[in-house]
Amino acid sequence: MLIVESQSLDVYRNLAIEEYLMEHAADHGPVLFLWRSECAVVMGKNQNPWRECRLGLMRDEGVSLARRISGGGTVYHDAGNLNYCVIVDRTSYKEKQAYEMVFRALEPFGIRAEKTGKSNLSVDGRKFSGNAFAFRKGRALHHGTLLLHTDLERLNRYLGSMFDRIETHAIASVPAQVMNLGIGGEELSAALKAAFCSGYGGEEAIRRQESNLDESALAPLAARQISDAWRYGATPRFTLSAGDVELEVAKGEVVRSVGADWEGAWFADLAFSLVC
């Protein structure tokens, strides 16, 4: 068993660490990774940022946009949000087991949580955790957010559509009423580590900081995370109507343009002018 905690608040580095651990930590058995980040919006692998995020507002206020390797909906991160990630062999993965780890960790704080919807965790019907999954090379990754002291006003401002008329098969987020748990990150981290050890084998786990990882293997993953080719270019094909202009975009590039001569242009460069 392996437990890794990150001291970095860089959302791109931490998402890269999740992928790194999925690919390079199989010999350690079950893995738990805990991390936080500065203010950021993180979308699922198969989502459209122009439909999920208010990118103009995020740009003006210096909020990062990231895309993770798992599916699911778009979430807001800040330092008041603790993220957990469990990685196990795919043959032994049980979705319920990861949720039960969180439930056990919350019990000492007098919090009784339940699973709601497809992959949310809630208290009294209000969501405090969204979860998503990835499967690769015989490994399963299950990760989720835990809202502790998150700025919910900023969360609600950044999540929403930049354009009204987008047609796409990209996964859409499902809005939900959210809440903060109001407990300390250090205390919950300790509880999660104890619940992980008891729930995934009961043995003493190897513990590492993210600074102990192989930087030569981690660096390419972090570089891809921050790249426009990943954040924007990985968006599923979509069409957009804005005023007298109709565009079709694939892999981040305009492949059909009606009402403007923009074929071949990088859509991320055009988007703000279309809003204006």
Image (cartoon, rainbow, N blue to C red):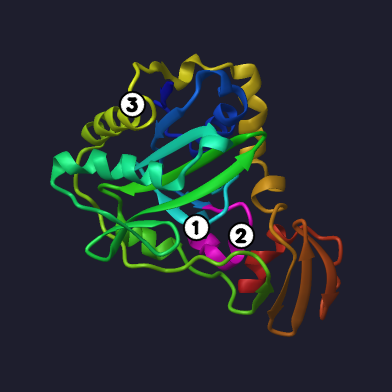
Q: Is residue 90 left or right of residue 201?
A: right
**Residue closest to the eye, 196 or 266:** 196
* Badge 2 vs badge 1, beta-carbon distance below 8 Å: yes
Res. 180 in view = yes
Observer-side mark, 2 or 3, equals 3
Which corner quadrant of the image does residue 248 belong to? Answer: bottom right
Which of 229 and 124 lies nearest the eye of the viewer? 124
* Crowding near the residue tagged with mark 1, few <14, some 14–19, many ≥20 C-alpha atoms within 10 Å: many
Label 3 vs label 1: CA separation?
29 Å
Task: Give the magenta range.
Answer: 43-57
- Asked whether residue 49 is drawn in magenta, I would say yes
For mark 2, what is the residue? 47
Q: Calculate the distance from the C-alpha at mark 2 to the C-alpha at mark 3.
A: 34 Å
Residue at image position (48%, 68%) is 160
Residue at point 33% right, 47% down?
146
Q: Which residue is mark 1?
A: 74
Circle 3 sits in a helix, a strand or a loop, which is it?
A: helix
Tell me which label, 2 or 1, sits earlier in the chain. Answer: 2
Q: Kindly indicate the quadrant of the structure image that contains residue 135.
A: top right
